[in-house]
């Protein structure tokens, strides 16, 4: 397992160098979310007759009587191997803070506005598709003038494709 773990750590580090935004979204933000939720589960009283067990984002972890909720004796969480180091790293800070605030959890749900490059990319793709369509029509018309039989065949192929 040690060799596989080292290979995974190296792969994640390499991906972080090449695509830092992807690592932030796929690994770091998920690690934050899972750490917060695991801490909430660990701090919830699941004993018989308890109203615990229903977890909602932003709820305070303190009980009404001011006592901290009892800690479960055993908690099992199954997470991907790539998330374990991040959860271990975040766990002490999240526990010391008493969990995540509503603002911290809400920040994980925010979708950033699209960058100017995304709009330019969309325009470029649509323009390219338009140019390909115009170019295809020009080729069909050119074939119709140069070789009438080939042009009719090309027109028939296009019409058949459009009918499907």
Image (cartoon, rainbow, N blue to C red):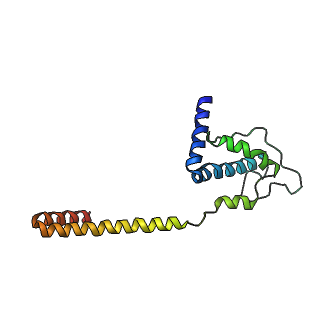
List x then y, in percent, for residue 42. Answer: 76, 45
Image quadrant assignment for residue 81: top right
Does residue 57 appear in this view? Answer: no
Q: Give the quadrant of the N terminus.
A: top right
The quarter of the displayed image where residue 58 is located: bottom right
Seen at 88% across and 51% down, the residue is 67
Side (left or right) of 83 relative to 136: right
Q: Position of residue 149 (x, y in %)?
A: 10, 64
- Quadrant of the rendered image containing residue 60: bottom right
Q: 124 or 63, which lies in front?
A: 124
Q: Considering only vertical position in the picture, is 152 above or below 46?
A: below
- Residue sitting at x 20%, y 67%: 140
Vertical comparison of 94 with 142: above or below: above
**In screen coordinates, is 66 left or right of 76?**
right
Residue sitting at x 12%, y 67%? 146
Which quadrant does the C terminus fall into?
Answer: bottom left
Residue 51 or residue 68, whichever sits in front: 68
Determine whether, in the image, residue 53 is placed left or right of residue 117: right
> Quick check: can you spot residue 136?
yes
Could you say where residue 109 lies in the image, as x and y percent from the top left?
64, 60
> Total number of numbered labels?
0
**Image position, residue 28 (x, y; %):** 65, 50
State the residue in front, 50 or 62.
Answer: 62
């Amino acid at each position: 397992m040690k060799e596989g773990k080292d290979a995974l750590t190296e792969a994640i580090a390499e991906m972080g160098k090449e695509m830092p935004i992807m690592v932030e979204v796929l690994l770091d933000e998920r690690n934050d979310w899972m750490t917060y939720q695991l801490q909430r589960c660990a701090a919830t009283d699941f004993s018989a007759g308890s109203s615990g067990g229903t977890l909602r984002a932003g709820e305070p972890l303190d009980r009404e009587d001011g006592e901290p909720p009892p800690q479960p004796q055993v908690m099992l969480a199954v997470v991907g191997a790539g998330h374990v180091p991040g959860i271990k790293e975040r766990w002490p800070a999240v526990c010391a803070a008493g969990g995540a605030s509503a603002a911290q959890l809400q920040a994980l749900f925010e979708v950033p506005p699209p960058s100017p490059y995304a709009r330019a990319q969309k325009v470029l793709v649509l323009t390219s598709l338009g140019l390909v369509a115009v170019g295809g029509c020009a080729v069909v018309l050119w074939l119709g003038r140069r070789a009438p039989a080939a042009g009719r065949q090309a027109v028939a192929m296009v019409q058949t494709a459009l009918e499907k």
